Image (cartoon, rainbow, N blue to C red):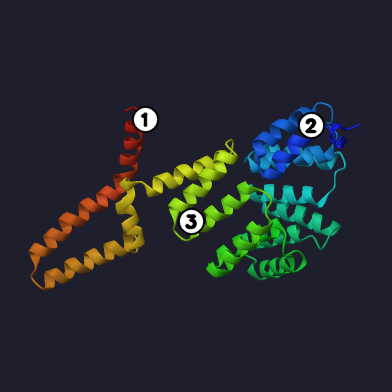
Amino acid sequence: MSLIRDDNNVAWQEAMHLYHMGRYEQAKEKFMPFLATSQEDGQLLFFVAYCSFKLDQLDEAETFAREALRVGYFGEEVYSLLGIICKAKGAYAEAEEFFLAGLAKNPQDGDLLAQYGYLMLVTGYEEKAKLLMAEAMRVDPESEVVLHYHYHFLRAYDEVEAQQETIRKYNEIAGSDVDKLLKMGLAALDRGNYREARECYRQAYLLDPGNEPLLYAIEEIDEIIHPVFFPNRLMQKTGGPVVWWICFIGAVFLFGKLDWEGAAGVLAMVYVPFCIYTWISPFIYRAVRKWGRYR
């Protein structure tokens, strides 16, 4: 008899509690000992596979998910997980096969409809994607998974107000505080509020300290908001390097026509060092970080 059927097992209850909280590294650590006596338990294999996926361990996640299918666990969630794993690996044709296999079992599965719709968007079939996403929202508008993909679908079309409404709905029903914070952080990034996004990710990392992709995201934001990159941010907010180059050439040409050679020279002495600084700023940043660690 599988240990995971024993609802009085304290270790199992703790593992499931961590799993539902979104603390996947700790949950996986609790699940793994059960595999020693329950290697043929498809549900357990699925839980381990999902934890591995959330920890960005794609190969391991795929192995456990396929093993769950092998032992006869044919729930739609397994096809869903294998589909998103294959999508993450860029194996779009195989991802579609898994989504279709899941939908063959349950054509009204909102999660699978949303995931398949987003795959169609990624692969360029926009009209089909819109139909699938609309159907997902119709059959299961309060699913965390449906709202997750609906939010990313809206981001592709830059529908800001609709994004915020989807985030609000998601946070009302999401069971994982980590997932809520991740969505809030992503929404803050879309608004250009990097400090708010960093705080959301920081709080999420405190809840899930084993989440390496989350730590990487925090480090990326730290780099973006560091004072060393202020000139880079200024350039990007005012059109980017191409716009600055066009404006510089235009200004030099205009000053030449007006016989303002001195002004053109001053502009060049400001513009050229400014551009050079934006090119070398990543090296300066790394030097500052290294110096800070050894102070």
Q: Secondary structure at mark 2?
A: helix
Mark 1 = which residue? 293
User: Considering only order in the chain, which callout, 2 or 3, is on the residue closer to the N terminus?
Assistant: 2
Please give left or right for residue 197 compared with residue 33 in the image.
left
Residue at x-position 61% and y-position 46%: 178
10 vs 120, nearest the viewer? 10
- Which quadrant of the figure has residue 259? bottom left
The span from disc 1 to disc 2 (Cα, nearest Å) is 43 Å
Q: Residue furthest bottom?
A: 258
Residue at x-position 12% and y-position 69%: 256
Crowding at label 1, few (<14), some or many (≥20) Cα neighbours within 10 Å?
few
Quadrant of the snapshot with the N terminus: top right
Q: Secondary structure at mark 3?
A: helix
Q: Answer whether residue 62 is visible to the viewer in this image.
A: no
User: Considering only order in the chain, which callout, 1 or 3, is on the residue closer to the N terminus?
Assistant: 3
Mark 2 = which residue? 10
Please give left or right for residue 265 compared with residue 279 in the image.
left
Q: Could you say where residue 97 lies in the image, as x and y percent from the top left?
A: 76, 54
The span from disc 3 to disc 1 (Cα, nearest Å) is 28 Å
218 vs 252, nearest the viewer? 218
Question: In the image, which disc is placed on residue 189?
Answer: 3
Residue at x-position 17% and y-position 58%: 268
**In the figure, 136 relative to 294: above or below?**
below
